[in-house]
Amino acid sequence: METEAKMQQERRVLVAVDESQESMHALSWCLSNLFPQNTKNTLILLYVKPPPVCSSYDATGYLFGGDVIETMEKYSRDSANSVMARAEAVYTDFNTNIKVEKKVGTGDAKEVICAAVKKLGADVLVMGSHDYGFFKRTLLGSVSDHCSKHVRCPVVVVKRPKDV
């Protein structure tokens, strides 16, 4: 009886996706391993855009024209649409019993992901690993490491096989 009730309970899995092959591999792994057939599942795809240009001036003090700002915003929208289209191609090959929610956030990826996990009530967070070395991770920081320390649900970091 308990297993039947557990099987009927909805599972909300948030997958952080970006332009990388690592995030698409993590999505594919998630669909293969975290979505049993007899459960109600919600897959939440989250793409985080970089923060918008805060100033109309570039680093040298020259004023950006409106067309430059508009071009950057269009690129940002196009990137989000492209990532979501790639993710859709991955999840359509899997179980059709999955409810999918697509979310796009803006800002620092680690902060946006942590806030989204809480706001959307995710049961599990799945992220790909870029597998940076010590020095690169020290300079850039690790989004997955930050999230694993600041969210209250399990975090699954999926490494992409070296030969893929």
Image (cartoon, grey):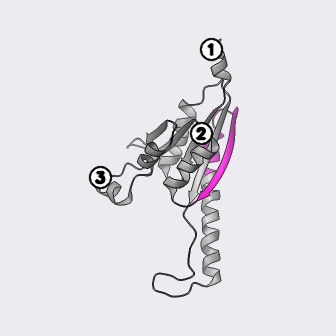
Left or right: where does residue 159 sit relative to residue 120? Answer: left
**Residue at 48 percent of width and 87 percent of height:** 61
Quick check: 133 above or below 33?
Answer: below
The reply to whether residue 17 is in sight is: no
Quick check: 55 above or below 131?
Answer: below
Quick check: 31 above or below 64?
Answer: above
**Residue at 44 percent of width and 47 percent of height:** 144
Residue 97: % across, % down: 70, 31
* Relative depth, front residue between 19 and 122: 122
Q: Secondary structure at mark 1?
A: helix
Label drawn at residue 134: 3
| Residue at which label 1 appears | 2
| Residue at which label 2 appears | 122
Residue 104 lies in the magenta stretch:
yes
Amino acid type of disc 1?
A: Glu
Magenta stretch bounds: 86-107
Q: Secondary structure at mark 2?
A: loop
* Quarter of image, res 48: bottom right
